[in-house]
Image (cartoon, coloured by chain):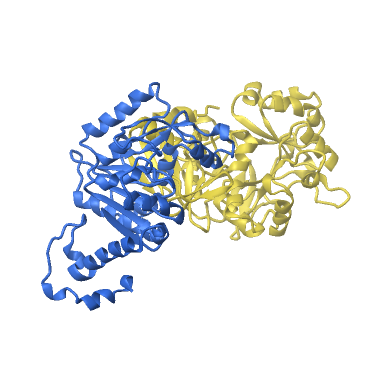
């Protein structure tokens, strides 16, 4: 699957020097009130160095008028939107058109590339998952890995695993062969996330020890928390190993707000906001398909499999997740923003140039008001229309 | 010399920043005829810079055709070190305003040849036609820029070894480790500053009171290099009440009375920015001797 390299597009832009003033910059876990941003060639550069070394005044000065400036949001679990469904393969051309359509549409929610939001890679949610914890998956697609890593290579392809485009795989540690293959998957450079699983807390901890770094949509598609058998949720309480990140869906439907607060209180630095959005995001209520399965989007924003009423993805946007997360947990503005920017970037190991406004980062950012509504969206330093 | 006394640091900053704003706007600088401004670092000008930034953001003041020359910079400190004078000027002033980077001149303490750098700086000032207004602060020992006691009053831009007292005082900015403090600095000379068409010195705080007294009530003396302004035809000192604590009562009353005469007897609107009287009012407004001694600063 061909993905356009983002580096190339950034350099194609004309090299204007852009200065942003009067913004409140979210950086280094704090809000900085009296600093400025300098952007050149699609990257954030050091303003003081540029001023004294280059002698060029800015070509454009943008007044942020007191708004918050945050890095562009990163969503590590999205299945589709605006009628486009990633889980069904219709060919290269349809996939590219679908991606373009979604990229343009998602800009108004704060996702951040030249025509719209940037695709950083693919998160494959399965097929090495447990049948008892299916979401909207076709049971016939599920697999075990009795041959270890070779089963993974057979299913995904060696090039796709090692280079592009697979970046995250959700696996169930309780499926045969998964734990044994985990270290090799991590060695390929894959970020392994555990989910759609009935794993015990012991199996889950083993997965983290072997290099898994994240939990896929905490609370959903896993054993319920039991005080003597905490399961994957029990990872939040482990002292034996470093606690992983956890994706969490903050639409108020997939997880009760109180549960979100409990997770946040126990491990605030691990929270990663995901939408798990599907094709019906941005579309009116009605019937749609997700991966070939019929689902219904109802007026209250719930999406259920028609056949059995199970939750089948969400129709929430990432900026609404950020607002909800702050509301449900009482966290600070900075923490809510970091859960959708810095933490997913750290999960993927790209925090030097994404999810941050530090010098050297890609100049993808948003202007937010105090209620965390997205006011403007910038990609490579250029404002993108959000209408 | 004009001595303007205000009640505290904020009022001093307000006065000098309004003065600078009005001077620049009255000058109406252009690309061919820019306003050349000399600037200091330290705690004295922080209020001034804050206000200048405010005026710029309000649309009252543009720096597009202002050229600046800073007084000094440490030798051997990286330009982006948080304690360099480049960093100070960036954070307090340049990042917030519309000054062209090419119009900013700060000595390069990392130049290969320091004497050549100093000569280059002097030449640049000369080539641009000299400094219109040089603003400075004063040290507790009466020094201006790094022209510490004993500096020649005719000195030009040069390398100076810092006094041990200065190094000690600065160590608080360098993790309290005296080994990290720069030992030398490049500085404009007393002569360089006095060559400007106008000099303004900001003097606030009780710890500067003795220095102010030595500089304006006693002779011109290289032990208190600011005293050289006594020989400048257009000098302005803006200070707060605390800084006047070592002055004679007579001196303070005299300068306060001058302001009173201008504001209440001549009318501030009849006096230009640099003290020139534009219009002299009729004699009826001059007070009787009795009324004069009843004025607040005379009681």
Residue at position x 18%, y 40% in the image: B33
Rendered location of residue A55, percent (x, y): 33, 33
Q: Is residue B147 left or right of residue A127?
A: left
Q: Is residue B136 left or right of residue B234?
A: right
Rendered location of residue A206, percent (x, y): 82, 35
Rendered location of residue A35, percent (x, y): 45, 46
Can residue B48 be seen at all in this image of the molecule? no
Chain B image colour: blue
Residue at position x 41%, y 35% in the image: B73
Along the viewing direction, whichever of A234 and A355 lies nearer the viewer = A355
Residue reaching furthest right? A228
Q: Is residue A181 left or right of residue B115?
A: right
Residue reaching furthest front? B219
Q: Is residue A32 left or right of residue A265?
A: left
Chain A image colour: yellow
Rendered location of residue A238, percent (x, y): 81, 44
Can residue B196 be seen at all in this image of the molecule? yes
| Quarter of the picture holding the N terminus of chain A | top right
Along the viewing direction, whichever of A371 and A159 lies nearer the viewer = A371
| Relative vertical location of residue A142 with respect to residue B293 in this rendering, above or below | above
| Relative vertical location of residue A13 with respect to residue A369 in this rendering, above or below | above
């Amino acid at each position: 699957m061909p993905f356009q390299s983002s580096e190339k597009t950034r350099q194609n832009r004309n090299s204007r020097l852009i200065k942003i003033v009067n913004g409140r910059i979210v950086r280094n876990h704090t809000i900085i009130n009296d600093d400025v941003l300098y952007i050149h060639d699609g990257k954030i550069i050091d303003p003081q160095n540029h001023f004294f070394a280059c002698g060029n005044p800015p070509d454009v000065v943008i007044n942020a008028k007191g708004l918050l400036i945050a890095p562009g949001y990163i969503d590590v679990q999205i299945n589709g939107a605006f009628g486009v469904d990633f889980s069904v393969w219709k060919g290269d051309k349809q996939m590219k058109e679908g991606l373009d359509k979604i990229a343009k549409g998602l800009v108004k929610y704060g996702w951040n590339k030249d025509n719209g939001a940037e695709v950083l890679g693919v998160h494959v949610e399965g097929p090495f998952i447990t049948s008892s914890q299916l979401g909207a998956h076709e049971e016939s697609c599920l697999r075990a890995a009795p041959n270890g890593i070779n089963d993974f290579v057979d299913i995904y392809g060696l090039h796709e695993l090692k280079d592009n485009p697979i970046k995250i795989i959700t696996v169930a540690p309780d499926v045969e062969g998964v734990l044994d293959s985990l270290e090799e998957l991590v060695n390929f450079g894959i970020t392994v996330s555990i989910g759609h699983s009935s794993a015990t807390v012991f199996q889950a901890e083993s997965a983290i020890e072997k290099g898994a770094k994240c939990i896929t949509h905490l609370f959903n598609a896993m054993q319920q928390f039991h005080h003597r058998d905490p399961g994957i949720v029990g990872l939040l309480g482990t002292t034996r190993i470093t606690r992983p990140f956890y994706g969490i869906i903050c639409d108020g439907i997939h997880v009760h707000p109180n549960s979100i607060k409990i997770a946040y209180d126990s491990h605030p630095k691990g929270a990663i906001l995901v939408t798990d959005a599907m094709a019906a995001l941005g579309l009116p209520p009605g019937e749609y398909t997700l991966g070939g399965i019929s689902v219904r989007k109802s007026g209250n924003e719930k999406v259920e499999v028609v056949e059995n009423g199970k939750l089948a993805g969400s129709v929430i946007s990432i900026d609404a997740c950020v607002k909800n997360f702050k509301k449900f947990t009482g966290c600070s503005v900075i923490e809510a923003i970091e859960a959708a920017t810095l933490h997913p970037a750290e999960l993927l190991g790209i925090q030097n140039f994404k999810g941050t406004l530090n010098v050297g980062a890609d100049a993808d950012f948003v202007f937010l008001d105090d209620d965390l509504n997205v006011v403007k969206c910038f990609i490579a330093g250029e404002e993108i229309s959000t209408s | 010399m004009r001595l303007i006394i205000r009640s505290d640091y904020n009022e001093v900053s307000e006065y000098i920043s309004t003065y600078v704003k009005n001077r620049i706007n009255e000058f109406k600088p252009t690309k061919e005829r820019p306003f050349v401004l000399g600037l200091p670092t330290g705690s004295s000008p922080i209020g001034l810079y804050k206000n200048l930034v405010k005026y710029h953001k309000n649309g009252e003041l543009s720096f597009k055709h202002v050229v600046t020359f800073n007084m000094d910079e440490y030798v051997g400190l990286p330009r982006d070190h948080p304690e360099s004078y480049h960093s100070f000027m960036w954070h307090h002033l340049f990042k917030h305003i519309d000054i062209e980077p090419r119009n900013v001149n700060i000595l390069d303490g990392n130049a290969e040849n320091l004497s050549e750098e100093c000569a280059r700086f002097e030449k640049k000032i000369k080539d641009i036609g000299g400094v219109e207004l040089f603003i400075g602060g004063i040290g507790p020992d009466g020094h201006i820029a790094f022209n510490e006691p004993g500096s020649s009053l005719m000195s030009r831009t040069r390398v100076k070894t810092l006094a041990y007292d200065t190094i000690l005082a600065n160590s608080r900015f360098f993790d309290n480790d005296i080994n990290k403090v720069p030992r030398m600095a490049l500085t404009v000379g007393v002569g360089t500053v006095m060559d400007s068409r106008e000099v303004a010195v900001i003097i606030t705080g009780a710890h500067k009171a003795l220095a102010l007294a030595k500089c304006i009530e006693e002779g011109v003396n290289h032990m208190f290099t600011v005293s050289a302004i006594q020989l400048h035809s257009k000098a302005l000192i803006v200070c707060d009440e605390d800084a006047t604590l070592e002055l004679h009562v007579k001196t303070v009353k005299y300068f306060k009375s001058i302001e009173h005469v201008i504001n209440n007897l001549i009318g501030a609107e009849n006096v230009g920015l640099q003290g020139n009287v534009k219009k002299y009012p009729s004699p009826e407004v001059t007070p009787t001797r009795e009324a004069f001694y009843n004025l607040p600063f005379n009681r």
